[in-house]
Amino acid sequence: MAADVHKKKGWEVPNGSLAPGDGQHAERAESPTPGLAQGTEPGAGQEGAMFVHTRSYEDLTSPEDGGVAARSPEERQGEPAEPTSMEQISKDFSELSTQLTGMALDLEEEMRQNKEGKLEPSPQAARRDSVLSGKEEEDVTMDAWRMHRKHVFVLSEAGKPVYSRYGSEEALSSTMGVMMALVSFLEAEKNAIRSIHADGYKVVFVRRSPLVLVAVARTRQSEQEIAHELLYIYYQILSLLTWTQLNHIFQQKQNYDLRRLLAGSERITDNLLDLMAHDPSFLMGAVRCLPLASSVRDAVSTSLQQAKAKSLVFSILLSGNQLVSLVRKKDQFLHPIDLHLLFNLISSSSSFREGEAWTPICLPKFNSSGFFHAHISYLEQEMDLCLLLVSTDREDFFTVSDCKRRFQERLRRRGVYHALQEALRTPFYSVAQVGIPDLRHFIYKSKSSGLFTSPEIEAPYVREEEKERLLGLYQYLHSRAHNSSRPLKNIYFTGPRENLLAWVTSAFELYICYSPLGTKAGAISAVNKLMKWIRKEEDRLFILTPQTY
Amino acid sequence: MAAAAAAGQEKQLAPILLSFFIYNPKLGPKEGEEEKKILFYHPNEVEKNEKIRNVGLCEAIVQFTRTFSPTKPAKSLHTQKNRQFFHEPEENFWMVMVVRNPIIEKHKDGKPVYEYQEEELLDKVYSSVLQQCYSMYKLFNGTFLKAMEDGGVKALKERLEKFFHRYLQTLHLQSCDLLDVFCGISFFPLDKMTYLKIQSFINRMEESLNIVKYTAFLYNDQLIWSGLEQDDMRILYKYLTTSLFPRHMEPELAGRDSPIRAEMPGNLQHYGRFLTGPLNLNDPEAKCRFPKIFVNTDDTYEELHLIVYKAMSAAVCFMIDASIPPTLEFCRKLDSIVGPQLTVLASDICEQYNINKRISGAEKEPQFKFIYFNHMNLAEKSTIHMRKTPSVSLASVHPDLMKILGDINSDFSRVDEDEEIIVKAMSDYWVVGKKSDQRELYVILNQKNANLIEVNEEVKKLCATQFNNIFFLD
Amino acid sequence: MSREAPPEEEAPGGEGGGERQGEGGCYLALCARPVHFEKANPVNCVFFDEANKQVFAVRSGGATGVVVKGLEDKNPISFRMEDKGEVKCIKFSLGNKILAVQRTLKNVDFLNFIPDSPQLEYTQECKTKNASILGFCWTSSTEIVFITDQGIEFYQVLPEKRSLKLLKNQSINVNWYMYCPESSVILLSTTVLGNVLQPFYFKSGTMSKLSKFEIELPAAPKSSKLSLSERDIAMATIYGQLYVLFLRHHSRTSNSTGAEVVLYHLPREGSCKKTHILKLNRTGKFALNVVDNLVVVHHQDTETSVIFDIKLKGEFDGTTTIHQFVLPPRSIQPYQIPVAGPASVTSQSPVPCKLYSSSWIVFQPDIIISASEGYLWNLQVKLEPVVNLLPDKGKLMDFLLQRRECKMVILSVCSQMLSEPGRGSLSVIATVFDKLNHEYKKYLEAEQSYTMVVEAGQSRNNPPLKRPVRTQAVIDQSDMYTHVLSVFTEKKEAPHKFTIAVLMEYIRSLNQFQIAVQHYLYELVIKTLVQHNLFYMLHQFLQYHVLSDSKPLACLLLSLESIYPPAHQLSLDMLKRLSTANDEIVEVLLSKHQVLAALRFIRGIGGHDSISARKFLDAAKQADDDMLFYTIFRFFEQRNQRLRGNPSFTPGEHCEEHVTFFKQVFGEQALMKPTTF
């Protein structure tokens, strides 16, 4: 397979010339997709993508790039980030926090959702809901605390605790002090600390002035991947504060205790961390769509498109952490990271189910210096369909709320509700549909569209730790394939519990997991079969025609 | 690194040893006494306070990681510019090696710009190098603690200075690779009968030179027999093959077929000569000083004289108790008994070896580039590395591929279950890693157009030809 | 030495005997059970027949009473015959069928001893005119040769007809003759000097003349009188070859005085050659015997004997090999004459027998007769004393390996050289092992070529070669193991270094002779190494396949895993190399819960369609690893699908419990659905 990819110098072939799924061709080549130019791979969007797509982490790492993103005039006037309005910020923020904290916890609701397995707020999040300061209970000197798979700490340059995933910041302030000391020691030498390695765990440092983020991980992830996750945390914080304000605060007060501002938002961060441990979206830097008949999806998109308003930048319909439809302003692109942050915000609380929420939110990859205002609501009580309308105008609540109404109305008129309900009954498809006995699971990412698809994780990965282990294996392959100095095209791994195969081209990435008793020949025919299948199913699994207003 | 070749004016600067130090926190616990902790520091010119600060950093790192794992503290620290490796070979004795990341020197509008390549150094390789530093020190000096007991901190400092001053210069950091991780032993392939002959030769020698405690037998710098325990042999082997033998190569090559004893008349019946100890046995003034080595340091703690005697390509190490100083008479006796027999044996082995080679047809260049290592007996085999020159072993493949091997190796060492990894690098080389019950095999294939199945077949072929006599899981 | 014991030669007995015991180590002895007969005296003549090894006591006066005693036959034959004058010579034909008696110079009388056949004597006169019969000898049960002073006459006796039929005769002047029954060769001394010897060979009715040869006399004969006496000649088969032994009293070669024994090899065809010279380094009265292929020379004056072994190395001068005696001279072991006569007679203590008495008569090969005391012994070589008389272990082995009764002695020598005091050096031990194994290998090869011929089938029936006889000199591995090595390793007196060195030395030697080593030797090595925790040594040995592969060895290694983990790998490798041990490999892997490995292995050798699903599912279940169980279960579901078009298990496979378990862990829906493609 790989051989062909090579021989035919894959991606240099002009688009379309090697139409995938072309049967006769499939006979010749081992792979139905011998060389996919970006944009022709299965799942590639037709009129370009809806996301800026992330080829490598470097995209993320420069704090200013938020600013780089093109901005429409509306935004500029809507931009509230005047340094003066400190109280303004805290006001916005108190609003946010009241919304976050004030949401009455509906335990039954949580339970129900758990049963349906739609979204699983981590026990962590649940605990936070019940007892605000639950963390204090954990004794940071106990092995239990040490043995957590992944610690995450955020601190200010003054060494002040900002966030700790486990254990109270107070109890850890000395430890964080040491962390800061180490960072500054090396900076004093015009050097920069990256990581510490020991048997069974890594300590990874990420420096984002004015913050320092540290992770202590016992996972198989590479240093880069852990750094990547820390950046998510960083952006999560920005999404609540904006980069401009964060810096402003610390310019004002070197040893400001940021927790005062972030109070109550920890659950979002916690949830993000839990999500990253389960959901490959973050690893893939891509978004997964709810499998849906293209006709239905088109109907939904058009309805969204028609329910527009001047201040709207993005209209997003999502279910669980899967995208149903997204409509954007012309030449406004949403970065997958920003979308992930939105997903996380929504999944981190069941309370958006109660009526409509109107909350300021910064989309750091889009513009790290300003707030948008997100209208968040569920379409129906019983339906896991969440509508997210992102507006530039803080005062526009009612207009936006009206958009929602119009959207629902159109849905009804087009009568796609039922079809949607149907689709929601099976939000994930089974790998069995592909019809390859040894195949257990796979992840396929279309690079040009920034979308990926993968089946539900089924037996033998029934237990939670098994699911995490599987993701861990994908992380391992991903990190090797994307190693910054020694990237790889193909990885074939034969392990004690499963065999995996990774295939990375400029157009797509494919990771498959199958029986450890599967042969290599079997693996290759599986890949070919799978690629054919994806091509066949692509309009159901992907959004091929992204809409703009 | 590959890029370095391309862009003309880019320059690649290899990794170098920035500093190497040994300290013991217990020696200077009080404020202002920090200097006392430092037992050895290279480069010595470094200003006192900087020494103290660097030691302090290491202590801090170790302490910090103890909060997350009291028993498994830090092993290495990655920074933008360098990597630091920590090793605690004896309780509270810490060895630290700081290696600068390789640099690409570019020129932006006249000014040189340095780009540190942070992913180039492999932790496992350099940690192993650090551990070998200790093992080698211990082989010739015994443990740190012993030195302290013998002569206090002063003695220890002297020994460290004496040893590392010379040893550190022999580290060739830029050419370290997977083989340094294994630090294996290459065994000489031999038929049963010849091996038995060697056995009975050794037994007879030990009988007639009864003060000999242990014997080791090598041919062509490959081990055939070791009376020492594995771990001691491992480091002794490294010393012999990377230091002692190469130093004696020239005369060896010179006088391969004419006795190298022109200066010693009346002794032309054999080619035997001492690699350690007296050069000229007829000179009554000849000094019989042999290197001392320390073995079994964690139980019986034996101190031995190391006598290395060589005839043609066959080398024998006789190890005798240090309490019995070997006299000139003894050396003469040894020479007269061992010399002739070893000469005969050496030519036997050579003959047999050539026969076997003809049979197995192994003369021609191995078509496979591979590295094999068995953790059980430390057996190591590499068709990637050329013959070791003093302390360097040069790989014949691109460094990046060697690093991929290293990556695969460290992936393997995470779990002790059997695994296999086949990857295709950007250069389109295929690299295969196989781990089967304590054995590791790494193959590099440059059939760029091959596909996975073909690659798999190639490896099968290799196993069938090279390893058909062992149980290799498929 | 005449075949007859002339009474006047009686010697004054008493003195002498074995003064030399003092030096100890008598390696020659008279047999314990001699033949006792009535001692010779004027009225009782004693005859000895070398062919049947029988003593005839003929007492005359009136009718002649004859008592015949042999070494073999227990109860003596006795009969009477009418006295027809002095008996010159009397002998039974082979198997005591017919008795021949010579009374006159002209003829020989015969008497049948065959049941119900004519009992009357009959006579044969020698054909040659006025020739006189020197003697006769039976060459078979019915064939007889008359030796006259003018030639020989070869007859067949027809007992029923009571007559003889002349088969062949040859006229030639004969001084004296000598008969060697083992090779049925008659040697005639001819010519005036008598030193030209003419051999004849007899075989079932035929008589063949072998090429004559001349014995070089010590000194040029002064007169033309008979100068080669039959006393100085003997014939004997040594190492299967017929030799004429000549006792030369005064060595020709001036430099060495003292007598020597010259051996002439007398082949069936071809000419007779002088091959060996045995140096006696002394003069006087000698007598020769050949015992166990050793030439024994008795020296009457010193009352000692020496032995020579022509197989041992001597100095070769191009034509002949000169031998010194193997061991220092020793007297025959002192001998007590058992008290004769009825118990009623006062029980006197047994009389020490006078050794080397002049009344001794020596016959070939190993007979000593004391006519005066009426005893017949055969001479025996005792090996135990030799051990201490031959310090050179190599030579000792060469010597012992040629002896008939050598095994136990050799083994004791081996054990002795391995233990204090006087432990042998490794190189000595090596030589000994090599000598033993050289002999051992020779036998194995003979065996092999024999069986090969047998397997080839006697179809083309060329002379059916007979199975090689296994002499005591063949000391095989089990002998060494049971009598020497295991004992030696058991009593751990020697330092283990030495113990191991010895074992390796033995294995080395076996390999050198390409003898397949038995695994119990390897086990011995391993046991010893393990006892001293020399695991790394063991590992190296196995690495170089010094301990050859075998299932028992592999199992032994497995059993060591608990104390030495690498043993597991070693034994797996061994099983792999055996290539007949695939089942064992699978068992080993399963026992370690390496179910996947086992399955992959079987698939590798293409046996995965026939294996029992249950067995592997059990193993997977014991491994207590759900993922593993799933994998294995799925594997067999797919096998079922492939083989039977349906993933479910048949009742015959007895996997119900596993199916249930699978459902309960992974749920009903995880079961494979019957697919069709």
Image: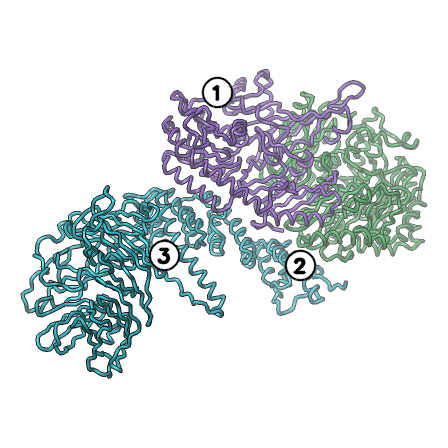
Chain colours: A green, B purple, C cyan
Which residue is depicted at the point 19% across and 69% down?
C132
Q: Pick whichever, B150 or C553, lies toward us.
A: C553
Percent across and percent down for residue C631 are 65, 56
Which residue is depicted at the point 19% across and 47% down?
C282
Q: In this image, C555 relative to C53: left or right? A: right
Q: Pointer 1: residues within 10 angstroms few (<14), some, or many (20+)?
A: some
Percent across and percent down for residue A267 are 73, 40
Q: Which residue is identified by label 2?
A: C635
Identify the amino acid type marked 2: Phe
Q: Which mark is residue C474?
A: 3
Looking at the image, can residue B217 be seen? yes
Which chain contains the residue that carries disc 3?
C
Q: Which mark is residue A329?
A: none
Q: In this image, C196 relative to C627: left or right? A: left
Q: Pick whichever, B150 or A224, lies toward us.
A: B150
Identify the amino acid type marked 1: Glu
Q: Earlier in the sequence, mark 3 or mark 2?
A: 3
Q: In this image, A171 relative to C53: left or right? A: right
Which quadrant of the rendered structure holds the C terminus of chain A? top right
Q: In this image, C166 relative to A253: left or right? A: left
